[in-house]
Image (tube, rainbow, N blue to C red):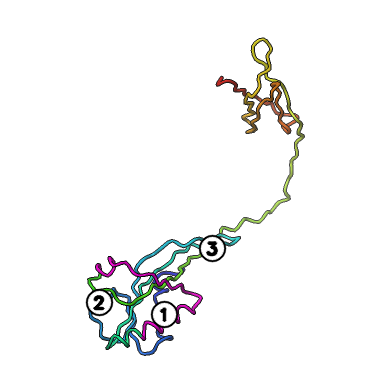
């Protein structure tokens, strides 16, 4: 089972293998950060379409991390962020979002806007499939003869009723009469079953 903390550890290892001598933290960005570090703040858990597969698809969501950088000087922080951003763009595991982070986010942190990007990482959880029980006996196949069933719906004075709805409720079949009041069910059991018909015409 893969959990969010497993993704956190994977991201920490990826950052440490991409840029040297950095401190990785998962807390919200702070106003003053004068150490060489990378911030990976889990900002949102989003929807991700299920994978296309013939088997039971895994449960999956998208984790959106706000990536920021810090250093002893702004130039160092910018360089660090650029290195990590281009490395993430080359990594097929991640999706980099470069849209501007809403001002409300920085206001909630209590800090002015700073260079950043959003790293979108998929999180999957495989579901156990229920295996079909093996067949331990020879299947018995029963067949039944079928035949068409047709008739005419008559109204008062032996007048054919067109457009009437004819149902065979037990068989879940429905058809309608033609202009001459005739109806047809192409296949119904030919024997051994009484078929009850229900006719609806002019709301009656």
Q: Which residue occupies the foreground of this view, 12 or 69? A: 69
Residue 181: x percent and y percent? 69, 21
Residue 123: x percent and y percent? 45, 68
Quadrant occupied by the C terminus: top right
- Is residue 105 highlighted in magenta? yes
Specify the quadrant of the image occupied by residue 161: top right
Residue 53: x percent and y percent? 58, 62
Mark 1 Cα-neighbour bin, 10 Å: few <14, some 14–19, many ≥20: some
Residue 154, compared with residue 84, is above or below; it is above
Q: Earlier in the sequence, mark 2 or mark 1?
A: 2
Dot 1: what SS? Answer: helix
Closer to the eye: label 1 or 3: 1
- Is residue 81 highlighted in magenta? yes
Label 3, on which residue?
A: 51
Residue 20: x percent and y percent? 38, 89
Q: Which residue occupies the foreground of this view, 140 or 3? A: 3
Q: Which mark is residue 85?
A: 1
Bounds of the magenta segment:
79-108
Residue 156, compared with residue 116, is above or below; it is above
Task: Residue lying at the far top in this picture: please name it.
Answer: 157
Dot 3: what SS? Answer: loop
Mark 3 Cα-neighbour bin, 10 Å: few <14, some 14–19, many ≥20: few
Residue occupying image coordinates x 30% and y 76%: 114
Residue 92, compared with residue 195, is above or below; it is below
């Amino acid at each position: 089972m893969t959990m969010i903390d497993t993704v956190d550890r994977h991201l920490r290892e990826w950052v440490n293998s991409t840029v040297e001598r950095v401190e990785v933290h998962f807390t919200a960005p702070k106003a003053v950060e004068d150490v060489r570090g990378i911030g990976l703040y889990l900002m949102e858990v989003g929807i991700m379409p299920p994978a296309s597969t013939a088997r039971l698809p895994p449960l999956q969501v998208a984790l959106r991390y706000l990536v920021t950088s810090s250093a002893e000087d702004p130039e160092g922080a910018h360089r660090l962020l650029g290195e990590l951003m281009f490395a993430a763009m080359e990594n097929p595991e991640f999706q980099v979002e470069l849209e501007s982070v809403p001002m409300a986010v920085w206001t909630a942190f209590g800090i002015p806007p700073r260079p950043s990007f959003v790293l979108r990482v998929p999180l999957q959880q495989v579901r156990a499939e229920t295996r079909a029980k093996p067949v331990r006996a020879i299947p018995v196949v029963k067949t039944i003869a079928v035949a068409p069933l047709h008739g005419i719906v008559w109204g008062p004075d032996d007048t054919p009723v067109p457009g009437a709805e004819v149902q065979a409720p037990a068989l879940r079949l429905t058809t309608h009469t033609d202009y001459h009041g005739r109806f047809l069910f192409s296949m119904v059991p030919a024997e051994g079953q009484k078929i009850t018909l229900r006719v609806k015409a002019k709301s009656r």
